[in-house]
Amino acid sequence: MLREFGAPLAVEELDVADPGRGELLVEIDAAGVCHSDLHYLRGDLRCPLPVVPGHEGAGRIVALGPDLREGFAVGDRVALLWRPNCGRCRQCVAGRPIMCEYGPVQAASGGLLDGTSRLSAAGETVHHLLGVSCFAERVVVPERSVVRVPDDVPAEIAAIAGCAVITGVGAVLNVIGACLGDAVVVIGAGGVGLSAVMGARAAGATTVVAVDVDADRLALARRLGATHVIDGSSSSSSSGSSGGDAVEQLLALVPGGVPWVVEAVGRPETLASAVAMLQPGGTAVAVGLGRVGQSVGIPVNDLVQKQKRVVGSLYGSSIPQLDLPRIFELYRRGALPLDELVGERFALEDIGAAFEALEHGSVGRSIVVPAREGVR
């Protein structure tokens, strides 16, 4: 539990209320450690305190609330969604469930869809993070915040699929679409960026360039399908290009620029670099979240005269109830080698060490598992 921004996480015993109307009690089997969680811990992103962090999880249903509509049963395996959708607001009806009007309300309230919490400690209200709070043994979530998981998909794969993977793969499949024969650049080789690399290959890109400052992450990007890698901290790339920064290296590799760049870092300078890498008419897809209040400077005439575009993509611009089953099927077919994304496993009691690994640039997605599962 997080009681103060910047303070260490504490493992505490909490009371979990029974699931209410349209809600489920889920026993957590695995939870991914996402950089967004670190932003909340540091206070770069804000939420009501005290709060149970964690928004990338998977488990199985152990109890049902009344008035369920989606046919869930005790024992169903599910992936959790940190951006639920009500199915009734203007955005949901228009086919943009990730823009559901209830999402920001839930995030700001620290509760579930009705704004109230199911967590407490000695009578004190404890808040949910993004309606999930999966750094726990059990959580109550709305039924619209889960998607069924096939029995042959491991829990850790289901967990990361619900955030990092759907964000990166979705940015390609839902925003870029089919890109047969195209070149795609992905800036940032964390969980989201590596997922975008896999998504680009699955979508037909023949040239996929991964950009990062960590050699181990770039090596993993290679294994996941990147045809070229650029070390943004040095003056040379593995493709043989040399001299200058990442933009110069990319333009030496692909003269004239590329049609698509996915920016998965969330820094103003990397988004500006993404635009500079584009060919005329190209599109930069902004995926990485920055700090609140950050802005980016982009030459206006570069956008106008070269008709470049910058588009945002939250949560892969996805419809999770449709896109997660598609991701699971691509994984089962071997088209998305998601096992490569899974890094070190930590017991829930050692969650502090998991975040230390994240801060030190660990390769792969750290996974937190409850004590009953052990650390495999």
Image: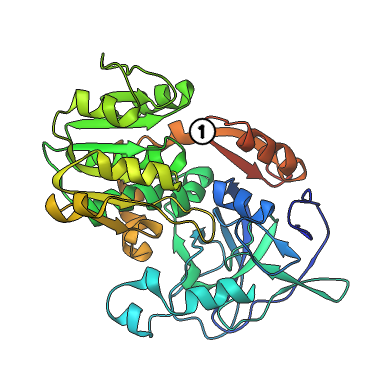
Quadrant the C terminus occupies: top right
Q: Position of residue 39 (x, y in %)?
A: 60, 52
Q: Which residue: 53% across, 47% down?
A: 155
Q: Which is nearer the eye, 169 or 323?
A: 169
Quadrant the N terminus occupies: bottom right
Mark 1: amino acid: Gly
How many numbered circles are shown?
1
Q: Is residue 83 above or below residue 92?
A: above
Q: Secondary structure at mark 1?
A: loop
Quadrant in the picture for residue 317:
bottom left
Q: Position of residue 363 (x, y in %)?
A: 53, 29
In this orientation, does residue 56 appear?
yes
Q: Which residue: 59% across, 49% down?
A: 31
Which residue is outermost to the right? 122
Q: What is the image's colouring?
A: rainbow
Q: Which residue: 16% across, 56% down?
A: 304
Viewed as shown, does residue 120 lie left or right of 298? right
Q: Which is nearer the eye, 234 or 112?
A: 234
Viewed as shown, does residue 164 lie left or right of 26? left
Q: Position of residue 165 (x, y in %)?
A: 41, 47
Residue with the mark numbered 1: 364
Q: Is residue 166 above or below residue 218?
A: below
Q: Which residue: 30% across, 42% down?
A: 274
Q: Dot 1: within a 10 Å radius of its alpha carbon, few (fewer than 14), some, or many (20 or more) residues?
A: many
Quadrant in the picture for residue 295:
bottom left
Q: Position of residue 60 (x, y in %)?
A: 57, 58
Viewed as shown, does residue 350 lie left or right of 270? right
